[in-house]
Amino acid sequence: MIETSPNGNNRKLTVHRSAHLIGGNCIEITWQGNRLILDAGSPLDEPETDADVVPTSLDVSRSVDGVIVSHPHQDHYGLLQALPANWPVWCGKPTEALMRLTTALMGDRLPQQIHTFTSFQSFDIGPFKVTPFLTDHSAFDAHMILVQVAGRTIL
Ligand SMILES: [Zn+2]
């Protein structure tokens, strides 16, 4: 989805995966060259190598402002190990602990720097204003993510 504002700047929302299936979520919001990734999940039905699980539409050669992980299920964070180490990650503090625990149990580690957010408190990642809302789900510390950029709001 691409929108062009009157000054010619493009807002773009790309669903790299999971528009038509459950799990493996990976959504990108782009604004004036800034990139925000919402979830970095591995597909539930595809236990392949790292290279196989990165959506071909996701450009890993360019930097991103941030990756937000909504909750600690692998179909929402399992792609992190295949993504660049210099892509900063944001999630809830319990989500960080659970992701690190699960990854360590597999004998691995998460390569990115992880920042934690607090539910219901807005924060900025580049031009994106992000507000996480704690919500009910079969994972502890699950969040809906509200993103505001360039006068538009995405929940
Ligand atoms: Zn889940």
Image (cartoon, rainbow, N blue to C red):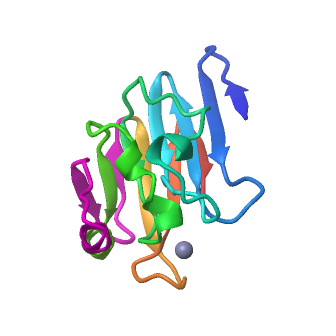
Q: Is residue 47 left or right of residue 109?
A: right
Q: Is residue 115 above or below residue 119?
A: above
Q: Which quadrant is the N terminus positioned in?
A: top right
Please name whichever residue, 94 or 119, is drawn nearer the observer in this view of the structure: 94
- Magenta stretch encompasses residue 106: yes
* Magenta highlight range: 100-126
Q: Is residue 129 above or below residue 5?
A: below
Please name whichever residue, 51 or 77, is drawn nearer the observer in this view of the structure: 51
Q: Is residue 3 above or below residue 68?
A: above
Residue lying at the far top of the rendered structure: 8
Please name whichever residue, 19 or 75, is drawn nearer the observer in this view of the structure: 75
Image coords of residue 137 (percent x, y): 54, 82
Image coords of residue 6 (percent x, y): 67, 18
Q: Is residue 107 above or below residue 138?
A: above
Q: Residue at x 47, y 22 (%)?
A: 33
Q: Is residue 45 left or right of residue 135?
A: right
Image coords of residue 30 (percent x, y): 54, 32
Residue 7, quarter of picture: top right
Report ligand 1 position as a quadrant: bottom right
Residue 92, quarter of picture: bottom left
- Magenta stretch encompasses residue 56: no
Q: Which quadrant is the C terminus positioned in?
A: bottom right
Q: Residue at x 41, y 71 (%)?
A: 72
Q: Is residue 127 left or right of residue 117?
A: right
Image coords of residue 47 (percent x, y): 54, 59
Q: Residue at x 62, y 63 (%)?
A: 23
